[in-house]
Amino acid sequence: MWAVFPGRYHYNLITIQGNHARTGFWRVVAVALDNDKEKTRSTNFVVNIIKKILMMIAGFALIGVFGFLINFTIPVFIALSFILAPLVLFVEKPLLERLKNCLRSVLIVPFLVAGILAPLRAIFVALHIFFEMPVDVIVEDFYPALLPWLNTGLGAVGTVFGIVGGFIAVFLPLRQLRQVVNLPTSKARSAALGLAEFEGVARRVEGEKRTAENDGPDSGRWVGMPEDRILFWGTKWVREEGEEGHTISSIQEWSRFWLEDDTGRILVDPQGVEFEDALGTIFFESVRKILLTKKRNSYSDNIGHNGVTRLLIPGDPVYLIGSVEINEDAPPEASDSERLIIRPSSELKQTAIWRRWLLGDAEKSPGTDVSDIFFLADGNENEAYEALKKGIKSVAVLATVWAASSLWLFLYSAPW
Amino acid sequence: MGIASTIVLILVVLVVGVAMGGYVISLYNSLIQVKNNIEKAWNNIDVLLQQRHDELPKLIDAVRGYMEHEKSVLEKITKLRVGYDEAASIEEKTKIENQLNREVARMRHVWESYPDLKSSQNFIQLMGRISALESSIADRREFFNDSVNIYNIQIERFPEMFLARMMSYQKHPFLEVPVETRQDVKIKI
């Protein structure tokens, strides 16, 4: 009974081919509108716009409700972080280590909680000034004299958090940016062991098997996926048996590939490295990233939904900074660069003294040392540089807004 | 000045001071890194250059009997080779290597006039070994020159130039591409 709309449709410049059966409310709207083939494109476009506007309104409303709830329970969060922090005493470790961890948790966790929530409190204080909205429920009702001190404390912690967090979140990518600029480009034929930079073209390794997290594109649930893909990153909607709604899951798929330049080729193994499509990440931590920015057609799964997809396919340009190591699995007849492999370094670096005392880390987590970089981008060095710079700018702006709003809260609420 | 203004002023001074200090440190570290990159790139190419230099005395012995009139060229090559081993810095070695390349290129032009030499088995084998090293040297030369280029740009760029002057960093010479590699391919019509 319900009509299907054959032909090609354009949604946000993405083309989906084939028949597409509409469901629910949107089918009613579409059928109610003119069914003529020529007008179907603009009709669906309008329907899509209306859908997006309603979703945005719903999203903002949800954010507002959550914001209210969290703001009014800030004192509860901070109190809980003090109460729960000592729970590390029950972890099975030597007593001295447990006491150290407990001390660290009590000192650091409430600070982190307060720092993260400070800008939210600043927003509500501003709303209170302009619209006379309530700022707090718990403290205002039971300990009203404490409220200015609570807000002042939140503002102070938020300011420090914004400044220190901003330095850290900008500092590490800046050092990575320096590596992009300072490292000379190596040739595949004459690559030396250690950290090196390469530019070339991706080529598939014959017979190479892909490894995928979650339900990968080879699961049979995807339509139109290129068989010779090298890397894949996407989101998809999953409907489980008996469920009405969908859950969104992220899929990452890696395979080894050859990086080929005008002198030869060298094997690259990006297994396990996280994907990004734009480096505007908040509090950028790891210097191990795969940055795929080239937009391609979305590939739908078999229930008609699609999402963000990024692919690296044979022939794509590749810019890579990674650790060149001996490939133990290379065949005996391999010579020169074919004996080598570029992958994230497996060697762990020592942490700074202050970090060892404060956080107890003797060795850095993989990917957090500036010399432990694995950065792969589907473009050239300039494009990778611009993407990194863009990420740093967005984090710097966020950190500035964070610190500034918290500082305002501190100065406004200060009882002296 | 109120307490709030004082706090803001102290905070701004602290943040700006730490940011500036951090920036200067990052510039310093960057200059150190590009300088060390040159040394690393040189060490990688030096290995191959040494191998090529080791072939030069045998080459000179092979051609000496034929090229009696070119004694000055052969002596100069020998002198430069010794000078290379005795050179103290990478800059000095780069300059000597460039001179050595020019002299070997001159020698190549000259032995074109000696058909007996060109057909000598010993000579052919030696030239083959030297040529085999050339392609590896070419890649590493490009890598080395890329490192030098990055370094030269950094020490002349604002504001790194001020720090570079304080650290007495000078421009580094490039490794020249040998003349015969630069010659255009002659098309026979």
Image: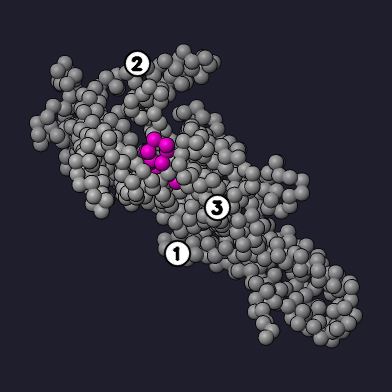
Residues behind callouts 3 and 1 on a single chain:
no
Colour pattern of the rendering: one colour
**Which of the two residues, A358 or A214, is positioned nearer the viewer here?**
A214
Q: Report the magenta residues as a range.
A: A300-310
Quarter of the image for residue A190 reads bottom right
Label 1 chain ID: B
> Would you place residue B50 above or below residue B72 in this image?
above
Label 3 chain ID: A
**Which residue is under mark 2?**
A83
**Residue at 64% across, 69% down:** B175
**Which of the two residues, A131 or A37, is positioned nearer the viewer here?**
A37
**Which residue is under mark 3?**
A314
**Residue at 46% across, 53% down:** A384
- Kindly identify the amino acid type of the residue bearing the numbered disc 3: Pro
Density class for disc 1 (Cα within 10 Å; few <14, some 14-19, many ≥20) is few
- Kindly identify the amino acid type of the residue bearing the numbered disc 2: Ile
